Amino acid sequence: MKTTHYLAFCAIASLGLISCNPTDGLDNYYVEPLPDTYDEKYKDYVENPFVNTSEQPISTFAVDADGGSYTNMRRYLYLGQTPPKASVRIEEYINYFTFDYAEPTDGENVSLESEIATCPWNTEHHLLRLGMKGKTIPTAELPNSNYVFLIDVSGSMDSPDKLGILKTGFKALVDNLRDQDRMAIVTYAGQAAVLLESTYGDEKNKIKAAIDKLGASGSTAGAAGINTAYEIAEQHFIANGNNRVILGTDGDFNVGPASTDELVELIEQKRESGVYLTVLGVGSGNLNDNMMEQIANKGNGNYEYIDNASQIQKVFTHEIAKFYTVAKDAKIQVTFNPNRIESYRLIGYENRQLSNEDFENDSTDAGEIGASQTITAIYEVVLKPESTTENYAQFDLRYKKPNETQSRLLTHAITNAPIAIASSSENMRFATSIAGFGLLMKQSDYKGTLNKQMVLNLGQTAHNFDPNGYRAEFIQLVTNWNR
């Protein structure tokens, strides 16, 4: 059997020569476990409990479009380990995947749908799925982009699965630039530096040559880099365009403002400029997942963890339209009918909760939805005995179009009768499969009778819609999971 250390294996993957995926022959290589000395930073959130509808009929939260928790879990499973409970954010497991939702209509940028089916891990309960989709924009109609790459080149980044994989990823984005798009590169270690002034996309060789010069050494002045990157983005701001800082780091900031609270405060100030933030986490050992996820949330952006070459292709090629925000400050409010629903529990979204009053407050920061992006949320509910024909609940969404300051209200009445999970839509079955897997990874108190085979049974019947093979990859990942 071929023996390959994980980092060496992914070093090859970072060059795009192979994909570090279970479908590429997991049995053909061996990976070493993470050392006990690794100091990765996560924040654990108490799971949402069941709520009595008669006491609290309204549930309000911000959308979450991140996928970092899922790919971080995938890294751990490749290593033959279970991810830390604190690293599991089930909403990010679900929203890593694209669902087959209808396009928005009537001039809106988001569509809504819902479905209720039996809960496979607790037969006395049901699951309520909420689905949203951001408007698809044809490539030719996408707004011009003003990107600033902000790249951590401190000593902790000197590794193939860190700076090496980021360089490959940024080159992939360069390949997708149009001539009228712009890109600048800012680096930071002991201090921030401008490696490449804002350059048009028709000079791809010049941009790639600058990326090739990247090397890692020194301490980490992340806040200085953030300030410089936003300054450049603002200098070249494109009205009605896609203005975005893309930060690539392991999150190990140690010069200047470095705490999560300090960096969140800084990012909250910067988001007022109209510049969006995407955070790409890389590597292992000193990964600061908590900080990166929080600043992405507060920076009107998203957080992705890059674990292999396949993920580079997903973020920078297959789903590049997500960089174009079609709905900002998107937040959900569900009003449950106490005559139909006894109690409910939102699965995931623990760190996205809002007060009910925040829903109509247009100054409240919430989540962003990109072009073509789907967002899914699942409630586990306890239904009352059939005694009325009233709606089960009302699903409301507030969002702002990119250049608007006043939110728009979409309303969807949840009237569809509950059905057996086996008879539900493919969207429902796959969402239930991935949510169930998240509950297992979370070692959830609410997992009921969940097991690996239940996850597989649902997932294996729900991957006809799988444009880029990510559902099939998930099924293979679960199959190879040593449980």
Image (spheres, rainbow, N blue to C red):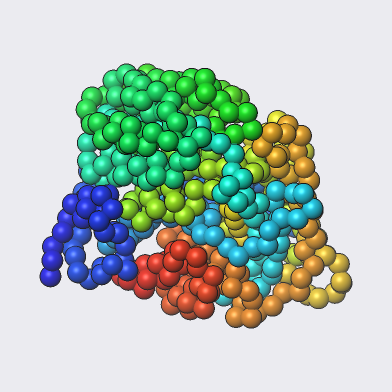
Q: 346 above or below 225?
A: below
Residue 86 in the image: state x and y as whole percent: 42, 49
Placement of the C terminus among the 4 image quadrants: bottom left
Q: 480 above or below 85?
A: below
Which residue: 13% across, 66% down?
Answer: 2
In the depicted view, which residue is nearer to us: 234 or 348? 234
Q: How many numbered marks, from 0 up?
A: 0
Residue 200 in the image: state x and y as whole percent: 45, 31
Q: 176 above or below 479?
A: above
Which residue: 45% across, 41% down?
Answer: 177
In the depicted view, which residue is nearer to us: 98 or 482? 98
**Can residue 183 be spotted in the picture?**
yes
Residue 44 in the image: state x and y as whole percent: 46, 46
Using residue 132 as the reference point, say whether residue 226 is left or right of it: left
Which residue: 63% across, 53% down?
Answer: 136
Placement of the N terminus among the 4 image quadrants: bottom left
Choose top left, top right, bottom left or bottom right for residue 3.
bottom left
In the depicted view, which residue is nearer to us: 164 or 138? 138
Choose top left, top right, bottom left or bottom right for residue 465.
bottom right
In the depicted view, which residue is nearer to us: 273 or 56? 273
**Can residue 356 be spotted in the picture?**
no
Which residue: 40% across, 20% down?
Answer: 224
